Image (cartoon, grey):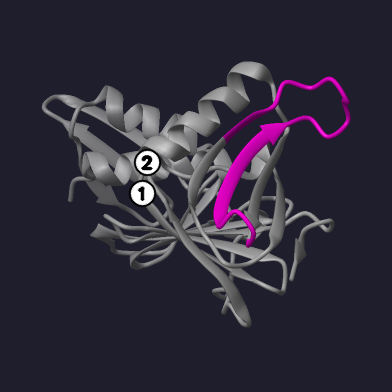
Amino acid sequence: MNISKDTLNILQNFSEINPSLVFNEGSEVKTMSPLKNILAKSKVTESFPKTFGIYDLTTFVGNIQSMGSPDFDFNDNYVCLKSNEDKLKYFYCDTSIIAYPEKDIVLKDINIEFSVSKAEFDKVIKYARSNGLSDFMIKGCSKSGKIIVSVFNKSSDTSTDFSTVIGTTDKNFKLFLKTETIKLLSGDYDVKVSSEGVIYFKNQTIELEYWVALEPDSSYE
């Protein structure tokens, strides 16, 4: 089997959430951050023949990219990557040492829904990273009818603050996240918010989903 460029992009993204990954038999790939505040899941085009663990996912993906489009030969304790005369043997790790989501999160009491475009999302993340802004807020105002995303530093009264309008609403809410928990692959997303303190992102183009824990000071009306 081979691994597509799209799947490699997803795996590279998942390595930012958790540097290790459990590949389950089949085509569903899931990861969870070590702090268990971010969960992600994707349905990929490949079907993996067995369950195995990769300790350093970034290095694993880098090896695949370096070899171009290698063939994969899965063995009991390792996977062998082959490309022309090149061959690379990469050993699995114990899956029990990797933080892994055993169950999917089932959202209850969804009271906020909206969408965010790739352009809007990329713009906000760009300003957050270039200015070192650690806090991410999504604010809904029923009076103005607007949903505004802003990034800033809560700990500083003189922090740089970037904001942009991303949609409309008839509700009042303030949703806080740490910028470091926004690990989404660039794209257009449908967003749902649960009163249980979880925000859910579903990619509009590919089968890719994220669940992120909101900060405790988030509020809804």
Q: Amino acid at mark 2?
A: Lys
What range of the chain is rendered magenta?
142-163
The reply to whether the magenta stretch includes residue 147 is yes
Q: Residue furthest left?
A: 84
Secondary structure under badge 1?
loop
Which numbered disc flags the more N-terminal residue, 2 or 1? 2
The reply to whether the magenta stretch includes residue 124 is no
Q: Answer with the quarter of the image where residue 18 lies.
A: top right
Determine which of the numbered discs, if any, sits on residue 118 in the image: 2
Q: Residues within 10 Å of mark 1 (few under 14, many from 20)?
A: many
Vertical arrangement, residue 13 with respect to residue 98, above or below: above
Vertical arrangement, residue 69 with respect to residue 166, above or below: above
Q: Residues within 10 Å of mark 2 (few under 14, many from 20)?
A: some
136 vs 51, left or right, is right
Q: Amino acid at mark 1?
A: Asp
Secondary structure under badge 2?
helix
At horizontal 33% and vertical 53% (from top left) the residue drawn is 75
Viewer can see residue 99: no
From mark 2 to mark 1, how far is it between C-alphas? 5 Å
43 vs 200, left or right, is left
Residue at the disc numbered 1: 188
Q: Residue furthest bottom?
A: 108
Q: Residue furthest front?
A: 143
Q: Answer with the quarter of the image where residue 135 lies.
A: top right
Q: Give the percent coordinates (x, y) of residue 192.
A: 53, 67
Q: Are marks 2 and 1 in contact (CB under 8 Å)?
A: yes
Q: Give the percent coordinates (x, y) of residue 28.
A: 37, 65
Image quarter where the C terminus lies is bottom right
